[in-house]
Image: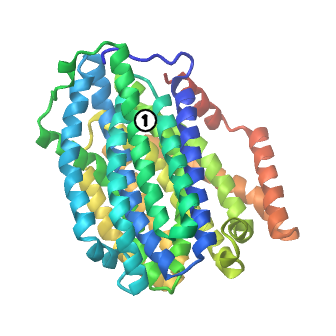
């Protein structure tokens, strides 16, 4: 694999749109699975156990996407030098060494893991989590290998195959859940996750094989080459440390949420999943597709600051709209989607948590677009220490937050710890001075636009009507004002090819 698969006219925005479209479909399917769980099983100790175990699956999937970002610069350089296949083989061997212990732990230590994840507060939740873990951990391992293969495809500018793979995998998983949830119960969700991972992996591997056949790649090219396994494991550890920590910040919140009463952890999970989906679809997709062109072009601190601000702007605009809608009509939307078990105060509480998580989304957007730059710039040594510091801080923050403001306090704890991670990343890249002020102005503009758009309708209209009118005002005002920084961001991303 020594040639690129050109994608004329796509550039970063086109590839980003393609990847974001895939992420949007996958997130939509994940949301549909959440709806099935809510409508079939309500809000109970069993759903607490399921979602706690599913949180570990999400941690592994997040690690897979982190690895996908971390190895992209190396694979892009390997592709330019005609040794992409050997580099991929070397990374695959290192992944085997990580994956085997994960599968063994899920098979023989699921009960212990379940007790930790559920806070040891409910036997029903613990048993459910243990059953689910035996399936979802191997499913996460499949995603680790799928992400590595997707990075290989990205190195030759093929984003379409990975987009199709993740969409097909998610669709197959949803189909199994819909077919088996009635006769088999909650374990069908775990089976669907497993099929999701297997299908995704098979499709991206098939794509790599097709490219190899088209380029007539000799078999000897697949022999592992480059850095030794120890160095690759170190690269995985460094690459996954921060994204894993970001996900573990949320996992740390789950035992505290469980102590707030039956179903509280379920409510927090749904609020977090809704918020994280928006971050993934927007900033996450742009972070992935801009890594390769930046690796080829190279950049310094000034370019890093410009890139962070430009990619953050588009995502922040969507965060502002989502936060306003959920603040006004979150309860109605949650009940309409998740069913009667989430009606009344429960749905309203979830809507409020999503609105509070808007602060976390702003910080998470910045982290999502800044994190890949550390690998492009080769500034990764501090990442594990940043991760450890954030996790150590999150425990007292989550404890205080849950004691004072319950679920809203947990949302604020996430926002604070994630914001500190963003500051640390910008300092490490030497881009804090150049990016912090402009990011602050962008966040302030979006916050102000949200207040002006959503507050006046809320004073005179009902919840749903005020949300609709507020969203319309938000879009109109954005089109009228059209801040120069937003227009500059759009032009920058279109030019980045």
- Above/below status of 496 relative to 308: above
The N terminus lies in quadrant: top left
Secondary structure under tag 1 reads: helix
The reply, left or right, for residue 335 in relation to residue 106 is: right
Residue named by callout 1: 203
In this view, the residue in front, 348 or 174, is: 174
- Above/below status of 262 relative to 113: below
- Above/below status of 173 relative to 379: below
Please report the residue visible at 60 percent of the width from the left and 26 percent of the height from the top: 491
Q: Position of residue 214 (x, y in %)?
A: 37, 14
Please report the residue visible at 66 percent of the width from the left and 76 percent of the height from the top: 342
In this view, the residue in front, 301 or 316, is: 316
- Above/below status of 76 relative to 54: above
The reply, left or right, for residue 170 in relation to residue 60 is: right
Q: Quadrant of residue 119?
A: bottom left
Q: Position of residue 39 (x, y in %)?
A: 64, 70
In this view, the residue in front, 223 or 230, is: 223
In this view, the residue in front, 300 or 355, is: 355
The reply, left or right, for residue 485 in relation to residue 419 is: right
Q: Position of residue 240 (x, y in %)?
A: 30, 50
Q: Position of residue 485 (x, y in %)?
A: 61, 36
Q: Quadrant of residue 199?
A: top left
Residue sitting farthest toward the front: 183
Tag count: 1
């Amino acid at each position: 694999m020594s040639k690129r698969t050109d994608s004329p006219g796509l550039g970063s925005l086109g590839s980003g749109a393609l990847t974001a479209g895939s992420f949007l479909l996958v997130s939509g399917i994940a949301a549909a699975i959440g709806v099935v769980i809510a409508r079939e099983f309500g809000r109970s100790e069993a759903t607490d156990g399921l979602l706690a175990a599913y949180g570990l699956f999400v941690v592994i999937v997040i690690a897979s996407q982190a690895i996908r970002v971390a190895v992209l610069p190396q694979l892009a350089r390997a592709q330019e030098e005609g040794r992409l296949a050997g580099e991929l083989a070397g990374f695959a061997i290192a992944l085997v060494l990580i994956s085997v212990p994960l599968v063994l732990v899920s098979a023989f230590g699921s009960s212990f893991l379940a007790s930790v994840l559920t806070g040891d507060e409910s036997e029903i939740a613990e048993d459910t989590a243990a059953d689910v873990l035996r399936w979802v951990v191997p499913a996460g391992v499949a995603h680790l290998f799928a992400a590595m293969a997707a990075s290989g495809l990205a190195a030759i500018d093929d984003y379409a195959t990975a987009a199709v793979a993740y969409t097909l995998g998610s669709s197959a998983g949803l189909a199994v859940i819909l077919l088996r949830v009635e006769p088999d119960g909650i374990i069908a969700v775990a089976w669907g996750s497993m099929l999701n991972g297997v299908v995704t992996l098979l499709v991206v591997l098939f794509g790599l094989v097709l490219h190899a056949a088209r380029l007539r790649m000799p078999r000897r090219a697949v022999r592992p080459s480059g850095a030794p396994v120890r160095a690759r494991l170190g690269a995985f550890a460094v690459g996954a440390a921060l994204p894993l920590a970001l996900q573990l910040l949320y996992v740390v919140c789950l035992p505290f949420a469980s102590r707030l009463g039956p179903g509280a952890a379920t409510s927090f999970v749904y609020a977090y999943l809704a918020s994280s989906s928006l971050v993934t679809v927007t900033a996450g997709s742009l972070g992935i597709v801009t890594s390769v062109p930046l690796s080829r072009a190279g950049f310094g601190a000034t370019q890093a600051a410009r890139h962070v601000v430009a990619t953050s702007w588009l995502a922040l605009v969507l965060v502002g709209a989502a936060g306003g809608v959920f603040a006004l009509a979150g309860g109605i939307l949650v009940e309409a989607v998740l069913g009667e078990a989430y009606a009344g105060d429960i749905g309203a509480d979830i809507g409020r948590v999503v609105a509070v998580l808007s602060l976390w989304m702003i910080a998470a957007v910045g982290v999502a677009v800044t994190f890949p730059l550390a690998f492009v710039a080769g500034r990764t040594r501090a990442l594990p220490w940043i991760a450890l510091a954030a996790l150590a801080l999150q425990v007292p923050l989550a404890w205080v937050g849950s004691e004072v403001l319950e679920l809203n306090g947990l949302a604020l704890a996430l926002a604070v710890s994630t914001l500190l991670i963003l500051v640390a990343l910008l300092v490490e890249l030497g881009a804090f001075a150049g990016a912090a002020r402009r990011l602050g102005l962008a966040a302030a503009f979006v916050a102000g636009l949200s207040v002006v758009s959503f507050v006046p309708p809320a004073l005179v209209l009902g919840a749903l009507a005020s949300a609709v009118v507020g969203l319309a005002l938000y879009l109109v005002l954005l089109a009228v004002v059209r801040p120069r920084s937003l227009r500059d961001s759009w032009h920058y991303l279109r030019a980045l090819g």
